[in-house]
Image (cartoon, rainbow, N blue to C red):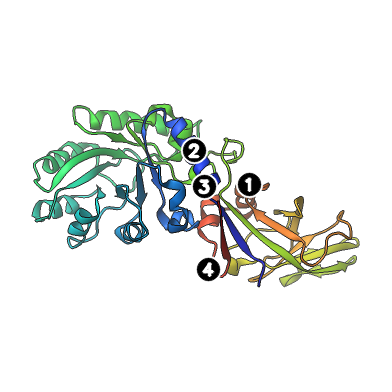
């Protein structure tokens, strides 16, 4: 079989969840598993999240998949509902819905549900995305409080720049949130992964870690390993060819890399068809049999070329290659490709085999 494999460590995920709880210092942890568990397989990773008090996804489709797979915790729908027909499904399945715009409030006021729903009322404190303005927040709260279809109201916002500890944006957002929430009963939920790691004032009553659960830090210029996390996904493959190139020989499409001396080059079975970033250029780090090397030339759909200069004859067809994960933080690869670790993890395609490790 083609050797491209994504190994998913449930032990690492369990460890990272424990780290999130430690940092939360008593706040309840809602584990975010949207986008198919950030590309790890939401159903696959459920056993490692059995102790998480709540889960969170983007929309009802993702939540129903988790319910059918055996998830028993309340599940938060971070984008809320899109049409009224979803509301009774939410009531039946114990989903908590985020309410972020007036139409969703009106849906609840018109609804006749089999049982009332818990909701999280979203404040736009400076993200500029979903949520009520501060001037409209209390009014939306009072409408929900008067609605018989609502059993409980959480106070929620989202941080835009918490990954940058030098930015004043987070402190400003926290001040806006404090003013908007003042006098309104309900548990407060503001901190994402970056808020949990870097801003204790953002923790409130509920934290919502996402990317950190998978061993990746959201913090600028840092790695998950450096922040005490363990990578959950390790993307591996193997060399399928080894050859020698000489001065003037070019490698890959358009010949963007040219040898200036004799090199051994390894060809590994991984490419953008597997989710490896096409824009990862020459110099992007990889591990060959656990030792650091670099790719050379352009990433192809199915293959990359790796510089084996300095490696001995022990490196041959079948030698393992690590693209990211254990021993090589995905943040480094993302930096080289001009993207973020989130995109790389979410982008691994279906033709990569997944292997779950206890």
Q: Earlier in the sequence, mark 4 or mark 3?
A: 3
Cα–Cα gap, marks 1 and 4: 22 Å
Asked whether, in this view, residue 330 is left or right of residue 294, the answer is left
Above or below for 288 versus 227:
below
Question: Who is closer to the viewer here, 258 or 50?
Answer: 50
First along the sequence among labels 3 and 2: 2
Closest to the camera, between mark 2 and mark 4, is 4
Residue at 48%, 46% (x, y): give it.
211
The residues tagged by marks 4 and 3 sit, at their Cα atoms, a distance apart of 19 Å
Q: Within the image, what quadrant is residue 344 found in?
A: bottom right
Residue at the spot of label 3: 214
Query: Reading the chain from its start, which is encountered first: label 1 or label 4?
Result: 1
Q: Residue at x 50, y 43 (%)?
A: 14
Query: Which marked residue is nearer to the observer: mark 1 or mark 2?
Result: 1
Q: Secondary structure at mark 1?
A: loop
Local packing at callout 2 (Cα closer than 10 Å; few below 14, some 14-19, many 20+) is many
The count of marks equals 4
Q: Which residue does the numbered mark 1 point to in the structure image?
A: 329
- For disc 4, the neighbor class at 10 Å (few under 14, some 14 to 19, many from 20) is few
Can you give x and y, in whole percent of width and height, for residue 7 in the image?
59, 56
Q: Quadrant of residue 86?
A: bottom left
In the image, residue 225 above or below residue 238 = above
- Earlier sequence position, callout 2 versus callout 4: 2
């Amino acid at each position: 079989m083609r050797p491209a494999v994504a190994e998913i460590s449930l032990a690492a995920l369990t460890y990272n969840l424990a780290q999130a709880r430690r940092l939360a210092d008593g706040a309840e942890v809602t584990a975010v598993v949207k986008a198919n568990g950030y590309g790890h397989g939401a159903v696959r990773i459920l056993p490692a999240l059995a102790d998480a008090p709540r889960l969170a996804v983007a929309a009802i489709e993702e939540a129903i998949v988790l319910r059918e797979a055996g998830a028993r915790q309340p599940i938060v729908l971070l984008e809320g509902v899109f049409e009224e027909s979803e509301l009774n499904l939410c009531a039946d399945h114990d989903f908590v819905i985020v309410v972020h715009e007036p139409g969703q409030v009106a849906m609840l006021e018109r609804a006749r549900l089999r049982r009332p729903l818990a909701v999280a009322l979203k404040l736009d404190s400076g993200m500029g995305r979903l949520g009520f303005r501060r001037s409209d927040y209390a009014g939306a709260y009072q409408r929900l409080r008067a609605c018989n279809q609502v059993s409980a109201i959480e106070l929620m916002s989202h941080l835009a720049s918490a990954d940058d500890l030098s930015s004043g944006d987070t402190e400003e957002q926290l001040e806006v949130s404090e003013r908007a929430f003042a006098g309104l009963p309900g548990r407060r939920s503001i901190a994402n992964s970056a808020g949990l790691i870097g801003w204790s004032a953002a923790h409130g009553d509920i934290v919502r870690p996402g990317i950190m659960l998978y061993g990746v830090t959201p913090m600028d210029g840092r790695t998950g390993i450096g922040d005490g996390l363990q990578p959950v996904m390790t993307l591996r493959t193997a060399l399928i060819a080894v050859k020698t190139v000489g001065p003037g020989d070019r490698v890959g499409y358009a010949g963007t890399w040219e040898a200036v001396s004799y090199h051994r080059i390894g060809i590994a079975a991984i490419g953008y068809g597997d989710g490896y970033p096409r824009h990862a250029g020459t110099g992007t780090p990889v591990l060959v049999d656990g030792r650091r090397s670099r790719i050379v030339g352009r990433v192809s759909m199915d293959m990359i070329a790796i510089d084996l200069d300095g490696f001995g004859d022990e490196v041959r067809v079948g030698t393992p290659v690590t693209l990211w994960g254990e021993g090589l933080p995905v943040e480094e690869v993302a930096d080289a490709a001009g993207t973020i670790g989130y995109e790389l993890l979410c982008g691994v395609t279906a033709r990569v085999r997944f292997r779950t490790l206890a």
